[in-house]
Image (tube, rainbow, N blue to C red):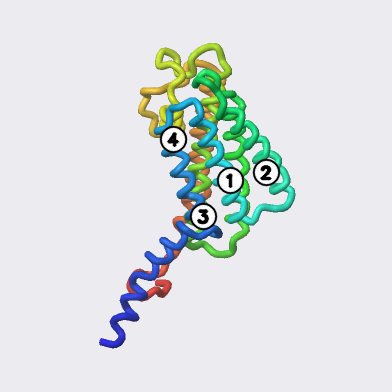
Amino acid sequence: MSGEPEIAAHRYHPFRRLGHSFVSADSYGLVLLLIVLTYGLSSTLSAAWAPSVVLFVQIVTVWFALRTSGARRSVLLVASVVLLIAGVVGAVGVFASSSEDVPPLIFFVSCLLYVIAPVSIARHLVLRTIVDLETMLGAISAYLLIGMCFAFLYRGVGVLQDTPFFGSAGDGTIGQTLFFSFTTLTTTGFGNLVPAYEPGQSLAVAEMVLGQLFLITAVGKIVSAWKPRTWSTGETP
């Protein structure tokens, strides 16, 4: 009977470890939560100042991603400049009087932020000598960041070009653009939203190819190499 608490502790240890990953500033779990938060805010907020709020959340997300991935000094220097620009652009966007007045630069800066973060994460994962829960969370975070990056790139292109990005469907909302980006990244392709003109069509092709390559070369290898501890004993099988 005395050994039962110890067995239970081993059994639920992975749950505690996973929960800790989502609150630790040194874990990709927190980065993943911030990405989900960004998606939620982007999909639900419709006010003129919404893109600026989302941009500030992105700044926090990228900062934690760089911190967790141990980015090199040169990367941190470039990122600091981009984060500063992002903060200024976001502050300007808050004073936009309508959704049409939202500076296109907001979307392109958002895209740039989401280029820096996954690159830093990918470098960190490649240098890791072990494949564990953090490796898996980092790979998922990088994959989602790619989808977010393309979404804001599409949005920026749609704001700048004279013709609607989705043709007869219009430019779409940020939520619709995110939906399109992730269905493209995963090559699901429901077909309800389709870029009507260039460069949107070519960007969609690039996202499809990049998404599949990332799944095959990165996530696939991590899944095959990851050997999590058993739920009951906590020992590697």
Percent position of residue 132, x then y: 49, 62
| Disc 2 to disc 1: CB gap under 8 Å | yes
Give the amino acid at mark 2: Ala
Left or right of 190: which side holds 51?
Answer: right
3 or 4: mark nearer the eye: 3
Q: Residue at x 49, y 39 (%)?
A: 211
Taking the image as shown, residue 189 lies to the left or right of residue 164, namely left
| Front tag of 4 and 1 | 1
Q: Which residue is mark 4?
A: 182
**Callout 2: SS:** helix
- Per the image, label 1 sits on a secondary structure element best described as helix
Quadrant of image for the C terminus? bottom left
Q: Which residue is mark 2?
A: 79
Where residue 177 sits: x, y (%)? 45, 28
- Asked if the residue at tag 2 contacts the one at tag 3, i.e. Cβ–Cβ closer than 8 Å, the answer is no
Residue beneath disc 3: 28
Tell me what residue is drawn at x 31 percent, y 76 percent: 8
- x, y percent for residue 229: 41, 69
Local secondary structure at mark 3:
helix
